[in-house]
Image (spheres, rainbow, N blue to C red):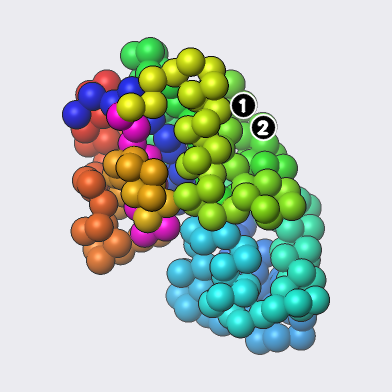
């Protein structure tokens, strides 16, 4: 399949950020005087916006929800963001797509401040044409919202957005892309599972398979 633009999720797709994310959740639970679940129980926390994790999954609301998010983000900014590693070979795919003349956007539910911190740490600031991120005020946070933002930004720049694919690792990527008629490829090295993979347009197990699928 030839695509006119390719979107990439960040956590679980390009960056193995699980250690830092788990640490930030554990710190948040401690500060809220709650017992932290095991990391296995917290695995579904990898991917959704914080409002979904703390609100919908953990049942927080009001001041407690706001405090939990604030505590998490403060710890994330203090070092959790860079407690991570790049998945080997994925940025080679990103750069191959751009070399082929295909626009590349990031589409992540992580807030822009945190995204820029991660990109700066790994030297990836110049590898994306558009940064589709959650807004720092959480008005834009769902995957569908950041996909829409990236689509609009590329469209305004004159790019062809008639055939777009989102490369991610979780069901939220599939669902957020589908709302806008965007295909999805789930990578098996991330934080998803077989049930989630089955919902995607395609799934790949290695960066070389991804590169082959994208035709670059």
Q: Earlier in the sequence, mark 2 or mark 1?
A: 2
- Judged from the image, the secondary structure of the residue bearing numbered disc 2 is helix
Q: Position of residue 200 (x, y in %)?
A: 26, 52
Marks 2,1: beta carbons within 8 A: yes
The image quadrant where one finds the N terminus is top left
> Residue at (62%, 50%) from the top-left corner?
140
Q: Which residue is mark 1?
A: 125
Q: Position of residue 128 (x, y in %)?
A: 53, 26
Q: Which residue is mark 2?
A: 120
The image quadrant where one finds the C terminus is top left
- Tell me if residue 192 can be seen: yes
Q: Which residues are magenta?
A: 163-174
Question: Which of the two residues, 44 or 166, is positioned nearer the viewer here?
Answer: 166
- Tell me if residue 111 can be seen: no
> Residue at (38%, 30%) from the top-left corner?
6
> Residue at (22%, 46%) from the top-left corner?
202
Q: Position of residue 97 (x, y in %)?
A: 36, 22
> Is 210 displayed left or right of 81 in the figure?
left
Question: Which of the two residues, 174 or 186, is positioned nearer the viewer here?
Answer: 174
Determine if the magenta segment contains residue 173: yes
């Amino acid at each position: 399949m030839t695509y006119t633009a390719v979107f990439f999720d960040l956590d679980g797709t390009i960056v193995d950020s699980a250690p830092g994310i788990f640490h930030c959740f554990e710190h948040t639970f401690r500060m809220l005087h709650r017992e932290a679940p095991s990391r296995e129980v917290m695995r579904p926390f990898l991917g959704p916006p914080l409002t979904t994790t703390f609100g919908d999954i953990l049942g927080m609301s009001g001041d407690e929800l706001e405090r939990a998010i604030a505590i998490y983000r403060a710890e994330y900014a203090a070092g959790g963001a860079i407690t991570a590693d790049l998945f080997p070979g994925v940025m080679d795919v990103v750069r191959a797509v751009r070399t082929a003349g295909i626009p590349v956007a990031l589409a992540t539910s992580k807030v822009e401040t945190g995204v820029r911190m991660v990109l700066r740490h790994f030297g990836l600031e110049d590898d994306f044409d558009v940064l589709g991120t959650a807004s720092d005020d959480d008005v834009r946070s769902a995957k569908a919202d950041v996909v829409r933002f990236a689509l609009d930004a590329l469209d305004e720049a004159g790019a062809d957005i008639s055939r777009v694919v989102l490369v991610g690792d979780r069901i939220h990527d599939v669902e957020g892309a589908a709302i806008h008629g965007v295909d999805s490829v789930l990578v098996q090295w991330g934080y998803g599972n077989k049930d989630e993979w089955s919902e995607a347009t395609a799934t790949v197990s290695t960066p070389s398979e991804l590169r082959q699928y994208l035709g670059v």
